Image: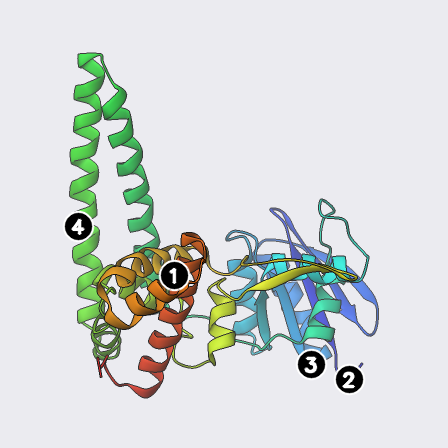
Amino acid sequence: MMGTYIGIDVSKDRLDVHVLPQDEAFWVERNGKGLALLVERLRPLAPSLVAVEATGGFESTTAAAVAGAGLPLAVVNPAQVRHYAQALGKRAKTDPIDAKVIARFAADIRPEPRPLADEMTQLLADLVARRRQIVDMLQAERQRQKRAVVRRLKKSIARLIAALEKELAELDRDIDDAVRGSSVWREKEDLLASVPGVGNTTARTLIAELPELGTLDRKQIASLAGLAPYTRQSGTWKGKSMIAGGRKAVRSSLFMAAMVAGRFNPVLKAFRDRLVAAGKPKMVAIIAVARKLLTILNAILRDKTPWQTA
């Protein structure tokens, strides 16, 4: 094993750290003092890579501390680490992933270090995430409104829906100001939205949640979005291809865009129709359209060339 690889398992109150090939383990508290101690211990090791498992937001401050110290950082997908551990026969599906497994994953797979999003990109991502939460709440309240029979409850739901709609409109203005106020983001949005089936909401979600778009090859970008197919296989048995992992918000947004593009984008509609005519299930066809759409969008940003029908 060439170089030093470090795995960090993030929990609510502590960080468990494992260093390879030294096989050294230690832990620190997940607070300001603990992060300072972590950086102090990692710097002299000059690691080739520090891998931090994504844990629903708990990893953010840890990743920021590591990247801020100038150390090579990769925030790794827990599903990929778990599949790696299972392939080694080290973990069952329900067993926890520990820091040593993450360190071994970093040493063997060597995921590419990626810089953290800058402050403005993080702000846009937070706004887009909050918009998604408001939309989910609106959908839930509208479902409750349909079922409500008590007049008092109907009025309560109506007031909340009105408040959420107002908040959604304000968030849309904030997002619009952020995107249109940046020449780089404005150019990206215009390029992405030039593709029939891709609206401003999808374009802004991709800008915020998938900043790597246009910088990676089609397989890498599909993997980040959770649209890269993999086949379940054991010995001579081979199961169906599936998709999993990746960035859920990106994948969901691409699914919605794929459903629209599969009807109104001439290229993608023809692609979808060929798949359906060949007997592919509709969901499989939608996934394939979403993957092809992502490939097109990746090329458009890479080449900085808007959609062209011919």
Question: Disc 3 marks which amino acid?
Answer: Ala
Left or right of 66 in this view: 6: right
Q: CB under 8 Å between callouts 1 and 2?
A: no
The label nearer to you, 2 versus 3, is 2
State which quadrant residue 47 falls in.
Answer: bottom right
Q: Position of residue 216 (x, y in %)?
A: 46, 80
Q: Residue at x 24, y 68 (%)?
A: 265
Q: Between residues 199 and 104, which one lies in front from this camera angle?
A: 199
Mark 4 residue element: helix
Quote the CA–CA distance across marks 2 and 3.
12 Å
What label sits on residue 277 in the rendered view? 1
User: Disc 1 to disc 3, how far (Cα)?
Assistant: 56 Å
Residue 196 seen in the current view:
yes
> Tag 1's secondary structure?
helix
What residue is disc 3 on?
46
Location of mark 4 (residue): 170
